[in-house]
Amino acid sequence: MANSRDLAPAFPAALPVDVSRRGFILTSAAVAGGFMVGCAPATKAGEAIKFGDFVRISGDGTVTVVAKVLEMGQGTHTGLAAIVAEELDADWLKVKTEPAPANPLKYYNTFFGKGFMLVGGSTGISNSWAQLRDAGAAARSMLVDAAAELWKVPASQITVAKGIVSHANGKTATFGDLAEAASRQKAPQKPTLKDPSKFTLIGKQDLRRQDSLAKTTGAINFTIDVKPEGCRSAVIARPPKFGAKVKSFDAVAALKIPGVLKVAQVKSGVAVIGENHWAASKGRDALSIVWDYAEAETRSTADLFAMYKEKASKPGTFSVEKRGDAAAGLASAAKVIEAVFEFPFLAHATMEPMNAVAKVSGLGAEIWTGSQAQTFDLINTASAAGVLPTNIKINMLPSGGSFGRRAVPDSDFVVDAVYCAKAMKDGLPVSMQWSREDDIMAGRYRPMTVHHVKVGLDAQGKIVAWQQSTISQSIMAGTPVASKDKADSSIIEGIAESPMIKAVPNLDVTASHGEIGVPVLWWRSVGHTHTAYVLEHMLELCAKEAGVDSVAYRRTVYKDSPRHLAALNLAVEKSGYPARLPAGRAYGVAVHESFKSVVAQIAEVSIVEGVPKVHKVTVGFDCGIAVLPDQVRAQSEGGLGYGLGAVLYSQITLKDGEVEQKNFDTYETLRMADMPIVETHIVPSNNAPSGVGEPGTPVIGPAVANAVLKLTGKPTFKLPFKQA
Amino acid sequence: MALEISINGVTKQVKASGDTPLLWVIRDELGLTGTKYGCGISQCGACTVLVDGQAIRSCSTPIEALGAGKVITIEGLSADGDHRVQKAWQKFDVVQCGFCQSGQIMSAVALLSQKPNPTDADIDAAMAGNLCRCATYARIKVAIKEAAGLSTTTQKG
């Protein structure tokens, strides 16, 4: 597979001999010329030497960093490589990454704990930071110790730079020269880490993504591109409503289509397996299926919102945060602002529709996919295939987006592939590919949500009471970690932590778990997608009521929150706010903390044909140490673009239980002309890295709504802005 | 009855029936996987290839409709990824997940062959059919201008 970066160097192993400068030159010549010089190599050609679980060094000096998380587009693998390379003082051009095997006891997320091999909550870099710094520093220390022993000099006199180990007496060696001897050195218990002021790679502007070339030539392989020996193509006819089941089906016409090999009922519907994707798709079109709707969700979106609004008009099932007396505070307030917010279901709509390749033979199974949660996929594959998790190999591929969609507690798209492979009963692999329609209609949406909020202001415009009732489906419901006696945090995250809410003397925030037969999931920035909108749009309404400027009001609200203030002030300073804009344009300001990062956005907005048009967004982004500043900017751009498309255009609606949007013609998303100019300014920080992929997403909605409020005088309580 | 198609400068005989979309012939029969499936109905542009220099959506083009049209896919753009458009993409690290980028690049190549000095409005119009869910649009625009040799303002702050 093209993506599993070939570890085998193209050259024979380098020399383990006297690594004097002359030796180094000889070795270089050998590498450059591709011939072997000197005595027997310490390692077989191509065999890399392990330095713990995350670093390998091969004879040609190539450093391979084992990446335990999915590369879904955020440049995470390049960032992981940079962390190791920094502590190792490696030659950046010789550092590669390779996906880790699915081993949750070794490659777990350090924030989630042993056994949980998954990435989410923008933790790809942050949960690897300490681990990979240690790994790089330990390997460096062992290389230094090996050189010290070889040269009979104190280790303290040895320096390392760009993959070369040197001593003042002129001796030098490459990592490849020393790798074998270094591997026999004792790994330090607590390796000495660099002072961040000495970083030469981390935080530098000129590090490029390692996957740019492969992604601009078509050479990179995604799951859709993988066809192991003997592989067939499968598609699945899925029920038109959630919870419906196959009652009966007729496959006669499908089996007459040339290239169709098999039709079989599987867990999620009726699978058609063919020699290629087009044959399988035509076969599926020729199926006739009778569905059983007895347990299906058959309500429509209007009914569901009416039900949610009724429930949110009263206190919710669970108390989220309470202090003082909110009812009394509202009763005595000089002014009360009341709002009922409506947020629709949203599909992730990754560019690569969900897919997996599976092979089930004997006691084992093999999967090829982009897995955001290897732990889930191992457990569910084991159950579907009837094999032990330890007999499953997951071949990790980069994914054409994910945004949370490829971390599914029941691994819907992976087990689809497993059942198709099982149906063939021949032990050969099957590539199961969802169509775009399957993907958009498959559920696992950002849950639809209603927030009913009442805010009381005193005569000076200060918030004295806040009452909020929220209803949304629990994402964790039905999993072993379901919230039964408190609100699922994915519904209300960001509210209680908000500095604005913390300062409210009379507070009552409650939440309920909605009951709708539509599966839901985490969608880039999860609960913040709606809580940030509610908080920052209400804040703007309060500022307006108080007659105070948007930025000035926030500076008061966030006066004891230095990270909020710094991000806001940086964005304000760089944006030109409050300088006059062309007629018909207004600034919209929003600040929000999510995934331990704080993002402030100042958007310049006008209204074109009834829909907001965002011209420019100036961003202040505090994500701790920015490992790859240009990739932080890329995520700031992409994150807000993802959020902007959703708030402007996107919604999944149901008619009698059936999803009304089938493809990109009806599930509208951001296109080229909608993309604003984005200027991202990173707040200097010495804190450990925090989230980057998600924190930009939830801020743009309220920034746009706050600008629209200025342009029209009207708040926006129902998303998306464009209503059919 | 085998059809012949000209792809990346080579004539190939294909077994697929005439109603098969070019996309699936390119991917499944010819094994060129740089061209992607994204929607199947010409809405996302992930499958964009050039036919006689024009950008078309291969997911909705049956091979029998090609005639003598000469097809160029991302693999046929350059041997080493050094076409000026590819180089501009690399310079600005346009890609994120990368799944749509073959299609984006092919649309950009077609645009520049017709409008060597495109305006922002030209770019918006020519690229309107290419979705990117990672929202790399701002960098795509910068890279197109770079490839056109126009002065660019980067997004660096």
Image: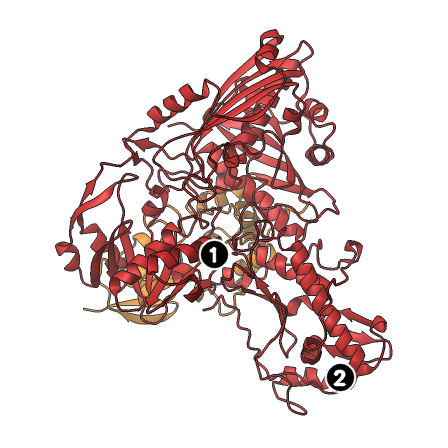
Chain colours: A red, B orange
Look at label 2 and name its amino acid: Val
Q: Is residue A110 above or below residue A669?
A: below
Q: Is residue A126 visible?
A: yes
Q: Name the quadrant of the N terminus of chain B.
A: bottom left
| Rendered residue at 47%/55% (across/down) | A375
Front residue of A393 and B145:
A393
Q: Is residue A125 left or right of residue B1?
A: right
Mark toward the start of the polypeptide (2 vs 1): 2
Residue under numbered circle 1:
A374
Q: Is residue B129 above or below residue A392?
A: above
Task: Looking at this view, name the residue that lies furthest to the bottom.
Answer: A39
Name the spot of residue A312 as percent of width and height, x first.
45, 21
Residue under numbered circle 2:
A19
Name the spot of residue A325 as percent of width and height, x first.
61, 15
Q: Give the letter of the chain under mark 2.
A: A
Q: Name the quadrant of the C terminus of chain B.
A: top right
Quadrant hosting residue A153 = bottom right
